[in-house]
Image (cartoon, grey):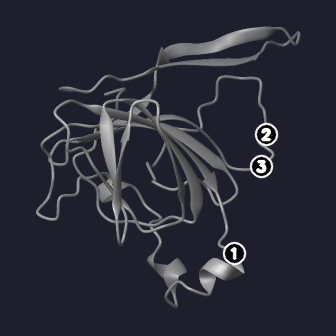
Amino acid sequence: MTGFRIPRRIVTGHDSAGVSVVVSDAPVPVSRELPEDGVAFHEVWMTDTVPALIRAGAEDPTVGALTVPPPSHGTRIRINEFLPGHLDRAGRQSPVHRTESIDYGVVLEGEITLLLDDSEVTAHAGDIVIQRGTDHAWANRGDRIARVAFILVGGEYGADVLGVLPDGVRESLMTHGPRDGAHAREASE
C-alpha cells in the first residue's frame, strides 16, 4: 500500500493446558485502502457481545465484511490512516455519517479535523476525540499522514437525544462499510 503502514497485531490465547500463549503475531489480516479518498482501514479486533466472549484459539473476528460501526452490542478497534491532499469540494475526506455508537478516536500521528454540523475542531497527536453518535466527517488538512486509532462501542440513543434528532434517524445510520468496499483490497492478497 502506497503511503500506508499496516500495523502489527499480537493476539494472546490459551493452550490446551491453560498456559498463556501468543496465537498470532503478524500484520493485521484485513486492511482496505480507498485510494481516491486517501484513506486506509486496518481492522485490529472486534467483539460481538459485551461482556466479550474470550476464546482460547486463533480465530479471527476481523475477517469478513468491513463495516464502519461496531456490532450493536459489541466493540471494534481499527486504525485509520488519512493521507493529506484528498479533500472533496466540501473540504471533507470522509462522507458525513452517523453511527449509534460511542467512538474513541486517539490521534497517534499528525492531525485530523473533525467536522460537525455547526463547527469543526482539529485534533493533534495525543488528543482524543469522543464521538457520541453525531453526524460527522473527517479531513486531513495537514501536510503529512494522520493516523488515528478508533475504539468503537455499540450504543443506543437515549430518549433525550432521540427527542431532538429528526424522525427516522435510525434509518439513516451508517450500517455498512466505507463505499461498500469499492477500491478495497485484502491485506492477505
Of the two numbered discs 1 and 2 on the same chain, state the one appearing first in sequence: 2
Q: Mark 3 — residue?
A: 50
Q: Of residues 171 and 164, which is closer to you in this image?
A: 164
113 left or right, relative to 163: left
The disc at residue 44 is none
Residue 58 placed where, x, y %? Answer: 65, 23
Would you place residue 78 above or below residue 172 in this image?
Answer: above
Disc 1: which residue: 158
Say which label, 3 or 1, has the lower sequence index: 3
Q: CA distance from mark 3 to mark 1?
A: 19 Å
Residue at the image point whose x is 70% and y is 81% from the top: 159
> Residue shown at 29%/62% (left/top)?
95
**Residue on which the image places disc 2:** 53
- Residue 111 point in image, percent of width and height: 31, 37
CB of mark 3 within 8 Å of CB of mark 1? no
SS class of the residue under badge 1? Answer: loop
Q: Amino acid at mark 1?
A: Gly
Q: Nearer the viewer, mark 3 or mark 1?
A: 1
Q: CA distance from mark 1 to mark 2?
A: 26 Å
Q: Where is residue 38 shown, x and y percent of the image?
A: 20, 42
Q: Looking at the picture, which amino acid does disc 2 mark?
A: Leu
**The one of 12 and 155 positioned closer to us in this rendering:** 155
Left or right position of 32 against 14:
left
Q: Residues within 10 Å of mark 3 (few under 14, many from 20)?
A: few
Q: Amino acid at mark 3?
A: Val
